[in-house]
Image: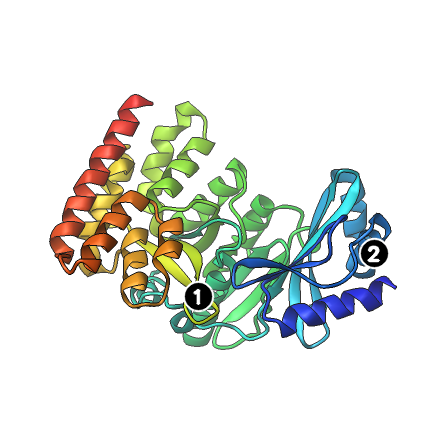
Amino acid sequence: MGTLLIDKLLHATVKQGASDLHLAVGQPPVLRIHGRLQRLKTKVLEPADTVALMKSITPDRCQQELQEEGGTDFGFAFGDMARFRVSVFKQKGNVGLVLRLIPVDMVSMDELGLPEITKSLLSRPRGLILVTGPTGSGKTTTLASMVDYINEHMDHHIITVEDPIEFYHSHKKSTINQREIGVDVPAFAEAIRRALRQDPDVILVGELRDLETIEAAITAAETGHIVFGTLHTTSAAGTINRIIDVFPTNQQEQIRTQLSVAVIAIIAQTLLPRIGGGRIAAFEILIVTPAIANLIRENKTFRIPSAIQTGARQGMQLMDDHLFRLWKEEKCTKQDVLLKAHSPDELARRIASAERGLFDDEADVAQAAERNDGKAAANKAST
């Protein structure tokens, strides 16, 4: 029963172009299509249904983890049609599942709309590149596209540490080894330490979850490796602050110094509905220049947005600037870009000016950056 039903549901997920399938007691199965939830016209799921669905796809070790810890994550192949990242959890005493569709075909950096500058970052000999954004913003797809680019164009040894493995990479110009938490290695930090003994050029860390993992990733970047990692932050400045806040107060000055040297770029991203169907990514790009390294070291991250603004010629961009362009190029609606904006009131004023035909891009952008700096400084002073 469970196997038959899950096959039908996964087939519907793929055929309807959904990104996620939600299975919860008390409602029919739900698909997320182009960012919006849509209920399937089927029966309401009962407790026995979600248990049967869970057992039909969940490995024994993960079922044990579900019982002991209340949740588990793993990868699942739906024949040759698709792969899914599965999250199983308990809620109100029942079992719930969320299955995220992983594209079978690798999406290129160009197809994702990543700025050209990101390709040059991948040829750096060492450093930490962070891809950030909320859950469901496409971080894993972006990282996979970067790894695939290196794999195709460079003769490197790439080691990925993931929980679970989502995109499967084959050996191309590079040699690539993928390790899964709970299957090949017990934890992220331990996997990074082991990777350093395996002659890597590139290390991908699926998620920088805790202090120990962050420390190991920074050490790997400092010792001559390109390291990729993800966090659930929405901006470049917020990413630096989040990492520093993980550490005890007496270590934070040292970590600022280390980050100012180790981090070479931060890519913060979000996904929006595209006019005409599908979704499109918006990116904030920070490249750590000597000036930005000083801001990190001197605890002046509130000035990073204006530094990104003035670094446009070096390939940097603020999230709200990219959102504005997506609206101006008629790729996204005004309502959707404002929902994703870091400073929605400021972006609304820019859009209103553009709609009136009064928009002087460079002047307005500079004034917006100055206002944002003032707000950030005021907020910092009040905390």
Left or right: 148 as drawn, with respect to 18: left
Which residue is labeled 1 in the image?
A: 146
**Mark-to-mark CA distance, 2 and 1:** 35 Å
Q: Is residue 209 visible?
A: yes
**Residue drawn at 50 percent across, 63 percent down:** 141
Label number found at residue 55: 2
Splitting the image into 4 quarters, where does residue 69 fall?
top right
Element type where label 1 sits in the image: helix
User: 99 or 187, which is in the foreground?
Assistant: 99
Q: Is residue 286 visible?
A: no
Left or right: 29 as drawn, with respect to 154: right
List x then y, in percent, for residue 363: 11, 52
Few, some or many residues within 10 Å of mark 2 (<14, 14–19, 20+): some
**Residue drawn at 35 percent across, 39 percent down:** 258
If the image is split into quadrants, where does the N terminus sit? bottom right
User: 35 or 218, which is in the foreground?
Assistant: 35
Vertical relation: 134 (above or below) 315: above
Vertical relation: 204 (above or below) 255: below
List x then y, in percent, for residue 10: 71, 68
Element type where label 2 sits in the image: helix
List x then y, in percent, for residue 85: 64, 59
Residue type at numbered disc 2: Lys
Discs 2/1, front: 2
